[in-house]
Amino acid sequence: MSGKSTDHVAVVGGGVVGLSVAWRAAAAGNRVSLVDPAPASGASHVAGGMLAPLAEAWPGEEELLELGTTSLDLWPGFADELARAAGMPSGLRTDGTLMIGIDGADRGELDTVAGHLAGLGRSVTRLTGRELRKREPALGPAVRGGLEIPGDLAVDNRLALTALRAAAEAAGVEFVAERAERVRPGAVELADSELECDVAVISAGVRSGDLHPALSGAIRPVKGEILRLRRRATALPPPVRTVRGPVHGRPCYLVPRDDGGVVLGATQYEVGFDTEVTVGGVRDLLSDAETVMPGIAEYTLVEATAGLRPSTADNLPLIGWLEPGVLAATGHHRGGFLLTPVTVEAVLALLRGEEPGALIKATDPSRLGGQQ
């Protein structure tokens, strides 16, 4: 790859990562084609939009935490640039996150997170149930304790996707509304034709494994069901901050939206490519949310959807060369939105023929043992 501004880059996949790579690569002077029959759909359309590396930190995932916090630091600048390029808001919310626990086991899990972060030199504030309710009056009496993580952010995923599409179009990205069948050096194979290119970037989520032999079997789908609720006039307002944590052992999060809505999630199943919403999943999500915020029972249920997180064995994404002319930027599991800025910076560096930095080394697809 020469890194010249005349290079033709084909980005395969139009989720948050693919749209962002296409926009920024075009803004850098490349000719860019984005191949996707339905951009801004899939897991990115379903996502809650949490930017929460500290809240999701867990022992044994230190590399993922470092990658996530680095990307989180890039998000405000990325959001500002996106808003200017798109001429509309980016959807970034900067109100922070509260982690809550209900029973003793839940609070023990929060202790593990707090202790792990403290061991890495990252402190969080422990709060009693009363202190939590002082910050967020909508929380119910069942919430007995928690952690305040002001640095973790959130983004309205659908507003951000709309802005990314607008920014990409303004930068001159060509949208190819076809399904890619295979990717090889020099071309993206479509159903009845080929799109020639200098470099192809695979960012097709759970479909990425079908597009190149080096990714075969490397990405598995992890199903997540999400509900979207809207406050009715007679109901209490939603929390200002993202509220998340275990509820009797089940993960639960409530992410507010500027229009009075709340995104509620998320279940997690290893069930292949099933995207049907189940009665049990909806029941559990609503029951846990009502435990955290009793007033949510007065909200309107607007939407129930399910998406497929593109997951790897070690939960780290795949960012790097698969072979000359073919790059991977996929496998982000539940961190697609969070890790977008750091992924984009790495891909742009690789397109210029540069090394993306030591932090990205852990995400190199070579760890899979496939062809490079």
Image (cartoon, rainbow, N blue to C red):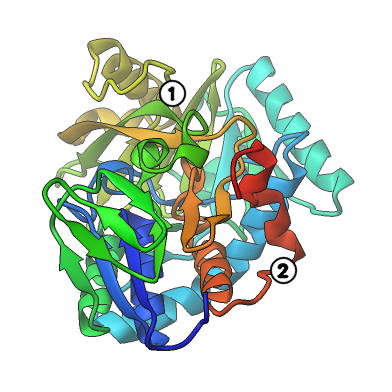
Q: Residue at x 31, y 84 (%)?
A: 85
- Residue under label 2: 357
Q: Amino acid at mark 1?
A: Gln
Q: Residue at x 40, y 77 (%)?
A: 24
Q: Residue at x 48, y 55 (%)?
A: 329
Which numbered marker is on residue 268? 1
**Callout 2 secondary element:** loop
Q: Amino acid at mark 2?
A: Gly
Q: Nearer the viewer, residue 260 or 31?
A: 31
Left/right placement of residue 127 relative to residue 352 reads: right
Pick whichever of labels 2 and 1 is earlier in the sequence: 1
* Residue 308 coordinates in the image, percent (x, y): 35, 33
Left/right placement of residue 114 relative to residue 169 reads: right
Q: Nearer the viewer, residue 109 or 313?
A: 313
**C-alpha span from label 2 to label 1:** 32 Å
* Residue 235 coordinates in the image, percent (x, y): 22, 41
Categorize mark 1 by other alpha carbons within 10 Å: few (<14), some (14-19), many (20+): some
